[in-house]
Amino acid sequence: MTDEQFNALAPFEEHYKTAIEVNYTRYPGSAAIDTMFYIYKAITKSRININRSCGTCLLHLVQDVGKLYFAEKKRREELKAEPEPKPDKAKKTTRKTNQKAE
């Protein structure tokens, strides 16, 4: 999923949570449905159609897009949480000693 797609889906995170956890969703609006539909088709390469009059169809779309969104969100968080590489212990550093001027 590209950054553009991820950012376009981010405002509807609450809809995804409700749809996945409670098996219910409120209508997020036709623009949101269009966004979810086209991004879902682009990511999965599926040939699905959507009936905007069918509540169950919309629920399944929001659930499917939500699963993709949360998987991508988890992947991005794991990438951020990766530890930085440790310095090589074989390399020794020398400390400069303070030498008094004579």
Image (spheres, helix red, strand yellow):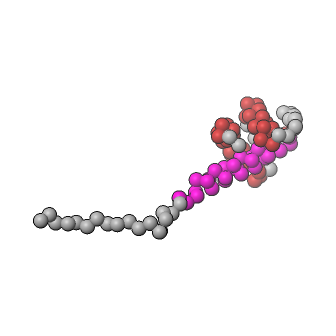
Query: Closest to the observer: 86 or 20?
Result: 86
The answer to whether residue 20 is left or right of residue 47 is left
**Which residue: 38% across, 65% down?**
93
**In this rendering, does residue 26 appear at all?**
yes
Q: Residue at x 67, y 52 (%)?
A: 75
Q: Residue at x 71, y 43 (%)?
A: 1
Q: In the shown orientation, is residue 57 left or right of residue 31?
A: right
Q: Residue furthest front?
A: 102
Q: Is residue 86 left or right of residue 101?
A: right
- Residue 14 in the image: state x and y as whole percent: 68, 45
Q: Determine the main secondary structure of the stretch shown in magenta.
A: helix
Q: Nearer the viewer, residue 13 or 83?
A: 83
In the picture, measured across the screen, residue 11 lies left or right of residue 66, that is left
Q: Is residue 23 above or below residue 85?
A: above
Q: Is residue 75 above or below residue 37?
A: below
Q: Using the rendered view, name the quadrant where residue 26 is placed.
A: top right
Q: Quadrant of the C terminus?
A: bottom left
Front-most of residues 13 and 43: 43
Residue at the location (44% across, 66% down)? 91
64 magenta-colored: yes
- Which residues lie in the magenta part? 56-84
Above or below for 87 versus 24: below
Give percent across and percent down for residue 16: 73, 46
The image position of residue 87, as x and y in percent, is: 48, 63
